[in-house]
Image (cartoon, grey):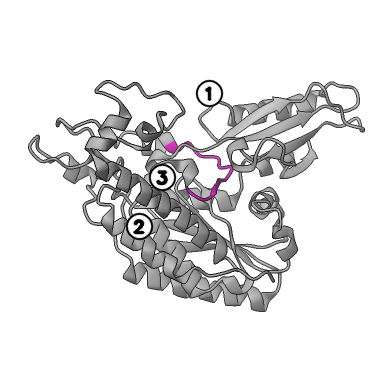
Amino acid sequence: MKNRFRHKGLIGMIFFGIAVAGFACQVPVFRFALERWETDSYTVVIVPGASGKLSPSENGVLKFLQSRGGANSGNMNLEVKIDSKKFGESSAASMELFYPPRSAGPRTPPIWSGALTMENAKTLVDSSARREVVSRLLSGESAVWVLIESGNKEKDDRAMIEIEKAIAKAEAELKIPDGVLTVAEARKVSAGNERDLNATLRSSIPLKIQFSLIRIARSNPGESIFREMLLHMESDLGEFRNEPMVFPVFGRGRALEPLIARGINRANIFEHSSYFCGACSCEIKNQNPGVDLLISANWEAAIAGNEVVVEKSLPPLLGIGALTGKATDGEEVTETTGSVSSDLISRPWIMVGGVILLMLVFGSVLILRNKRY
């Protein structure tokens, strides 16, 4: 087992930084991610057989996949491509599943590959465990802990007990950050009450501190592709396939790197839970840890209809996009009231806030990576 250094004092520094950074968004990380972080798309690449063409049944599978994914379907974060320059050695077509490029880089090997059959396609796009994750997250749960069992009953039961004890502690001790407005409260805000819209929930999904556990056996064929998504999040996870691993899933199906074997303990699980329930100090998704899972769910439709519209005048919000000269979606920010540099000079607290923000992000990533084992 690899030795991992524990940055004991880092937690205190992070929470001190959060207390100092009064400008931080007060919506908990788990809820901010659910309501505002769009999912990254996986890619499934279809490789025709030796003939270079798909059979009628294979074309049926292709149409099924296209109906579930793609920019216009809204059903799941999946893009379907056909590799017209590559042919398989056998007569049957195959498919390969890849992580989103932002998460894994452009040249990573496939997570999973198999024959282009309807059975494989259905296992790829959906499974009972993923449906249950979606149901629990949309009911307001802070995170769902997905335990991939080792097959060793003693190890798996020990891990389950540690997780359940940590969940009980987190639900008893953690609190929603002060200042968060529910939908009903936000609609009562008057024009004279200068409350930050970034502290306002965007849906009426219950806001609560609640966690749960899902166990997945290594031998469960219906979860085979889902398991591979989790077990390929890091290149060295194959070394620990005989150990239980637990992956916290939050937001719109975003998973963090796992806790493994003896790393599955109350202290580590509680620390992760504290991260989910803390104020969202960094609103930019890709500066936060984790990888989106391939989930069959229309998140926008599930949340739509509950948006809050507060009729009040607010000053322009200056986010990290303005500090870098780019918006969070990559588009250029147009300056309308003077240069950013002059604004920073006249408002030095912004520079201090930016430094604290970077410390929070860096510290969170280090903690979640270094306390897994």
Circle 1 SS class:
loop
Question: In this rendering, does residue 280 appear at all?
Answer: no
Q: Residue at x 66, y 79 (%)?
A: 154
Q: Residue at x 24, y 23 (%)?
A: 337
For marks 2 and 1, give the CA distance. 34 Å
For marks 2 and 3, give the CA distance. 14 Å
For label 2, the crowd category at 10 Å Cα-Cα, with few meaning under 14, some 14 to 19 and many 20 or more, is: many
Label of residue 34 in the image: 3
Label of residue 278 in the image: 2
Q: In this orientation, which residue lies closer to the viewer: 323 or 85?
A: 323
Amino acid on which the number 1 mark rests in the picture: Asn
The answer to whether residue 153 is left or right of residue 319 is right
Give the residues in magenta. Answer: 288-299
For label 3, the crowd category at 10 Å Cα-Cα, with few meaning under 14, some 14 to 19 and many 20 or more, is: many
Residue 332 % position (x, y):
42, 23
Amino acid on which the number 3 mark rests in the picture: Leu
From the image, which quarter does the N terminus lie in? bottom right
Locate residue 201: give its quadrant.
top left
Residue 160 % position (x, y):
55, 72
Asked whether 294 falls inside the magenta stretch, the response is yes
Looking at the rendered image, the disc whose residue lies closer to the viewer, 3 or 1, is 3
For marks 3 and 1, give the CA distance. 21 Å
Label of residue 72 in the image: 1
Asked whether 301 falls inside the magenta stretch, the response is no
Circle 2 SS class:
loop
Q: Main secondary structure of the magenta part?
A: loop
